[in-house]
Image: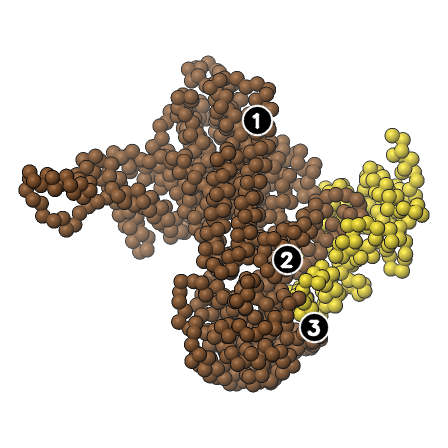
Chain colours: A yellow, B brown
Amino acid sequence: MGSTSSTLLKIPNVEELMQETGFSSAHIIRLYDRFKALDKEGRGHLCPHDFGAIKELAMNPIGDRIIGAFFSPGQETVDFNNFVKILAHFRPVDKDRPRDPNSPEPINSRSNKLKFAFQLYDQDKDGKISRDELLKVLRDMLGMQVTEEQLESIADRTIQEADLDRDDAISFEEFRKSLEKVNIDHKMSIRFLR
Amino acid sequence: MELKMFIIVLGLLVGSLMLLEGAASSPDMGTGISQNNHDHKDVGHNNTHSKKKPFPVLSLDYDTVRLPFEISLWVLLASLMKLGFHLIPRVSSIVPESCLLIVVGLLVGGLMKLVGESPPALESKIFFLYLLPPIILDAGYFLPIRPFTENLGTILMFAVVGTLWNAFFVGGLLYGVCQLEGLQHLHVDLLSCLLFGSIISAVDPVAVLAVFEEIHINELLHILVFGESLLNDAVTVVLYHLFEEYSSVGTITVTDVFLGIVCFLVVSLGGIVVGAIYGILAAFTSRFTSHTRVIEPLFVFLYSYMAYLSAEVFHLSGIMALIACGAVTRPYVEANISHKSHTTIKYFLKMWSSVSDTLIFIFLGVSTVAGPHRWNWTFVIMTVILSLVARVLGVVGLTFIINKFRIVKLTTKDQFIIAYGGLRGAIAFSLVYLLNPHHFPMRNMFLTAIITVIFFTVFVQGMTIRPLVDLLAVKKKQETKRSINEEIHTQFLDHLLTGIEDICGHYGHHHWKDKLNRFNKKYVKKCLIAGERSREPQLIAFYHKMEMKQAIELVESGGGSKLPSAMPSTVSMQNIHPKKTPHERALPQLSKAREEEIRKILRTNLQKTRQRLRSYNRHTLVVDPYEDGWNDILIKRKKMIELEKKISQMNNYLTVPAPPPDSPTIARARLSSDPQAWGIKASTESVPTIKVDLASPQSPESVNMVDEFGKKGSQAKESKEEGGLMMKAPSAAKERKDKTADEDDDREPQQRLMRCLSDPGPTADEEDEDEPFLP
């Protein structure tokens, strides 16, 4: 099984990556294989087109947003390291991690998971989910089945419920607060990324 | 004072119960009575020889009504007991209801014995056929699907492996103990012990429900213990039959074990399939019930009961069939049936399960006094200890394995509660009771031991679990309702996770859930849900439910006080100038435009709520005197004008007085789609209405919005403040422009609204309302 170590060697800065994301080597290898499978042309990085080729993702109502989240603003490609870093958000939380106050919060902490989700709402990256952005999300999710008025009512109600500082938009803190009862650690974790 | 009266009534009741039992069962009186009334001929015949008796003006004929009378008396007693416990607040907060009921049963049994009567024991047939199904159906129908499926793996582990472990551990060790010196006279063989072990190892859903309902523990633990108690039925059934079959033979071979495993799969999966089939049938039937709303609940009950009985015919797991039926039926039936039917189903289920529950515990007490006992210190004590030990070891061991696969791990506290919550109950008792004394000479001993274990778990564990939960600071159930934010974000996260799983190429939990949802939406919903509702997305259904609840709450609260401006329901009206909102939130004075809006809101929303509740009334027994009659229209018109005057005089004051009904003229004008006319005049309103076309084949309950704004997407709904509840209905595609048949709708008297709204129905219990199926 020499392929394990050889695969690892192919990846630049793999030690650093493992440290930062908390993935084990087995996971890294798995993700690397997946990356290679997606990267059909073997260029060493992925572009949105490659993601689009995933059939189920195309059917996903927010598929485009998810794909967009992998690419930093302005960039057209994502390399393996960034690919893994994004996926690290979905690693289950380690409960018994020693709390080192000096080290930065791990990528898969509850707060960072929520931030990732928040960014998917907040496309213009102004730190708030405006009414229009919310409407867009609702439209994506509910599609053709509802009228515009219904969408707007729902959007209004949502904002009013969550909006505490009355700026008619949902900030990250308000977003976090409205989800305090939901078990984010459970909801936003993928089992195999352990 | 209340208490004293109550006790007197109770005493009279118990006394009469026993008297009647005595009267009926004593042969002399019976004959004497029957002779008088049934055998006219005889009497006549006798008359020729004896003196003619005067015509009996008043006679006693108890025999014909004996059975129903006694049953009713028992049920009445049970219900009064339940009532009584809540009159004594202190006791009911310390002692769980189940304990009190068993004590009552003991007392009644004891009394009966004193009088000389033999107290009736809990017959297994009655228990399994009549008392158990309502409780299980109630549990299955309101099963919270999402936590259940999320924790299915864990639950199955506990149910199957845990029960097996318990059975073999207890059975084996008991056999070992019985082999010891001094106990060999008992002649218990291995198979009998294993049978006993398997009976006693099953956690009982009735007992668990009874106790856990009162302690309001967090959802995860509740569903784990409860789910386990439901799913272990299959294991129990198989083990029971296996050991019972072969105990007479004396040996079990490997083939038998293998067959046993196959049997287990057949029993559990078969039960589920049977339940699912009946569930789909029920859902399908409910699609066509739009014209006979009154019997809708009956279908749900009947199909579920038939599912149970059908499963029992084949010795499949009846409990699993019932759960499957309830869980499958619910999402589709709820979309099809009317609001009132839904309330009826809920209340009937709760009522029946409550009565069953009470009766079971009382009878358990009575049977303890009645049942033939054989006390053997060692056996009984060992049983109790072993079952406790087995449970703890089982839970700890299994959790260790399970935690390797769980994302959210089970802590030690959780494990303790799970182990401690493994209560045994009436199912175990009934199963032992079913044993044939000839095949099992030790039956009485088993009976005693089981009763002791049941008493121990229910009393000791049941009473102490509440303080323990507080002591260990176990997370309690969160009482607040789901907000629309949570709903939206949760769905969003579901999609997100599905997407990420697809990217990773990992076919996980979300992937399959998504696939199932898609299948559900595409094929199943189309078949099983009538009309428009089949295309209604989950979120919209949820949103409607919320708005509806708020509407009812709003009107019920009278709407007299100034409603806080931050009331969520109001915002749904904000469409035109959202930017204006922050500035004008605190309105000191109502401008004219505002007044109009408010008036409009009131009118529309009240009419809407009315409509939803009203269309069901058409088929009820109550003949509504206001159903017909055009003179009403004039009255309503007058009232409306008065109301408008009133409103224009008010400032920050929103009321819901005798709400303004609509005349057909207005309705018709409205329907001719005049979106921009926001005039004060009543006749040229264009208010969004709910068009309930009763003539349509589609369910009247699926209210259709007259989309008078057309597809221009004009934002004609401007409103501000409170009272604004826009219930929007799902029919986006169809614009119902046919206004002809709608005069019926408009002759709506407000009194009906008030009457309808006095039904506390859906607002009373929110636990189950907000659980969408596969959200």
Labels 3 and 2 within one chain = yes
Q: Nearer the viewer, mark 3 or mark 1?
A: 3
Name the amino acid, label 1: Gly
In this orientation, which residue lies closer to the viewer: B57 or B20?
B57
Q: Quadrant of the C terminus of chain A?
A: top right
Name the amino acid, label 3: Lys
What residue is pinned by disc 2?
Answer: B538
Label 3: which secondary element: helix
**Residue at 80 percent of width and 45 percent of height:** B504
Instruction: Name the spot of residue A47 as percent of width and height, x first.
Output: 89, 53
Image mark 2: chain: B
The residues tagged by marks 2 and 1 sit, at their Cα atoms, a distance apart of 42 Å
Which quadrant of the structure image shows residue B604?
bottom right
Image mark 3: chain: B
User: How many badges with numbers are in the image?
Assistant: 3
The residues tagged by marks 3 and 1 sit, at their Cα atoms, a distance apart of 64 Å
In the image, is residue B9 above or below residue B664?
above
- The circle on residue B260 is 1
Which quadrant of the structure image shows residue B26?
top left
Name the amino acid, label 2: Gln
**Residue at 43 percent of width and 33 percent of height:** B430
Label 1: which secondary element: helix
- The circle on residue B408 is none
Q: Are marks 3 and 2 in contact (CB under 8 Å)?
A: no
What residue is pinned by disc 3?
Answer: B711
Q: Quadrant of the N terminus of chain A?
A: top right
Instruction: Name the spot of residue B660 as percent of width and height, x first.
Output: 50, 78
Q: Nearer the viewer, mark 3 or mark 2?
A: 3
In this orientation, which residue lies closer to the viewer: B412 or B119?
B119
Q: Earlier in the sequence, mark 3 or mark 1?
A: 1
Instruction: Name the spot of residue B769 as percent of width and height, x first.
Output: 55, 56
Instruction: Name the spot of residue B686 as percent of width and height, x first.
Output: 60, 79
